[in-house]
Image: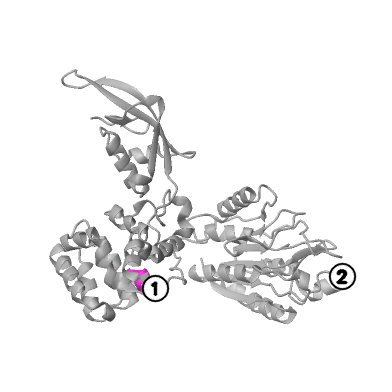
Amino acid sequence: MNTLAFVIGNNDYIEERAKLVNAVNDAREIASVFERLGYEVISGFDCNTESICTLLEDYNSKINDYDASIFYFAGHGFQFDGENYLAAIDCPIENSNQYMCKRHSIMLAEITDIIKNATTTINIIIIDACRVSVGRGVQQHFTNVNAPEGTIIAFSTSPGESASDAGIDGHSIYTGTLLKYIGRERLSVEELFKKVRRTIFNLTSGSQTSWEHTSLVGDFYFNTGQMVHSISLPYDENVVKDRQYQYKGTRIDKIIEQLKTYNWDKQNPAILEFLKVPSSEITNNENFLVGRNIYQCSGYAFEATNFIKDLNSNLRQYFDDEENHLLNGILYEIYFNSNGDFRHENIKKNMIEEVFSLRYDDSFKKSFEFLNKTLEPFQEELFFIPIDGNEAMIDIDIYAEQKSKKEIFTDKEINYEEIQSIKINEVDIHKSFSKVCQSGLNMDGLKNCLSDFLVAPENKINININSNIEIKNFSFIKSKEDDIFDF
């Protein structure tokens, strides 16, 4: 969907007590995410009255060229005499009246009027305001507002509440939470704001509750798979989305081309050729891309497998100060595909024990910090993210019952343990896990399967089983949809 985004963030208010810390940072990061999503972005930071008027005119003149529009504001907001205002930095918030409010603020009604007259079918208004309580003459919260047809209006607080400028990761609690969800693929706008509201409520012990008013009649997804790589990643987009890589015929290009063939007879010599290239002749982008391709060959091509088996030694010559771009590429390939998209349930798991063992070595600290930063938007989908070896254990509670059955042809009695639930916290992974793990294994086999399924080292998995049942030959409880697993 062709989308126009209008983003404003204001920190530097003329009154000392009204100055903010995080609003501009919030708006810049939101604008950055929108750019990565492929939206056209109109943005302004620390906007006075004159610059806001110019930006509003730009927004109004462009909106009819788009299917959807998004307006985001971070800064001071308030209501006066039943009207909602978003303050420019030259607005005298503490000693204001209705005339000053109108001259030095955006009226929320101005945004909704632009939307009403536009041809867009989806419109989203996001207001992260009411940052601190400085009110004298104005009320530091918003009055109720109705959304025009096809519009959702999202506020960082419920009517009558104020919000803090402080929060998480250098952002307000609202925008910091919004940023954790907004890039997630195929998450509808209503479901996104529901997740944001639940998280904020939990993180503030109920003192802040975000609020939305909606008249949307269609679906909108911020990310339908179009999100480009993070502009904070220190690599060119054509190596992060390596299916777009353009070969120029260099020595490294030829090596990469051979590694991509899925032909062992070409991949093995390519690894040996790479080891002959002086590290000083290899760029950071090339190291990153070679690392990705060595990992995708490992477990199959003999030389790539050997490279990973002795990874600690093999990586030593590829350090650039404290950065190891070859390892960064290996780690990135585990979680992201050739289009730079998160793999979700298709995470690559070959030889991860060898790769993850490097996190115990401080030499590779920067690479695991790089991975953690890259995985931030997807942390809710992962039970384990490698960082330094001190990660929390994954506690898995398994409920099983001792059972027996007769073998079909011999009538021999077979004892087995029927697993009925596998819970991590309150999440039962039994059904999805039973589709990828075979029955008939003992405890070691079960733990190995769980390690593979969770993409986590076995030494980070703690299994608790009811009634002192010993897993020797387990099966999964059958459901109405699934056939029983035979031994």
Identify residue for label 1.
237
Q: Quadrant of the C terminus?
A: top left
Residue type for callout 1: Glu
Above or below — where is 459 with respect to 61? above
Give the residue at the far front of this rendering: 362
Identify residue for label 2.
97
Displayed quadrant of residue 139? bottom right
Above or below — where is 201 with respect to 233? above
Q: How many marks?
A: 2
Alpha carbon separation for disc pair 2 and 1: 50 Å
Residue type for callout 2: Asn
Density class for disc 2 (Cα within 10 Å; few <14, some 14-19, many ≥20) is: some
Density class for disc 1 (Cα within 10 Å; few <14, some 14-19, many ≥20) is: some
Does residue 313 appear left or right of residue 53 in this picture? left
Above or below — where is 283 with respect to 201? below
Give the residue at the far left of this rendering: 265
* SS at mark 2 in the image: loop
Asked if the residue under mark 1 is in contact with the one under mark 2, i.e. CB atoms within 8 Å, the reply is no
Does residue 219 appear left or right of residue 424 in this picture? right
Where is residue 320 shown, x and y percent of the image?
A: 35, 75
Where is residue 426 shown, x and y percent of the image?
A: 49, 38
Q: Is residue 241 magenta?
A: yes
Displayed quadrant of residue 47? bottom right
* Residues in magenta, as a range: 238-243
* SS at mark 1 in the image: helix
Q: Residue at x 33, y 56 (%)?
A: 356
Does residue 435 appear left or right of residue 214 in this picture? left
Magenta-highlighted stretch: main secondary structure?
A: helix
- Taking depth in this image into account, of 196 and 223 the one nearest to the observer is 196
- In primary-sequence order, the first of circles 2 and 1 is 2
Where is residue 383 shown, x and y percent of the image?
A: 43, 48
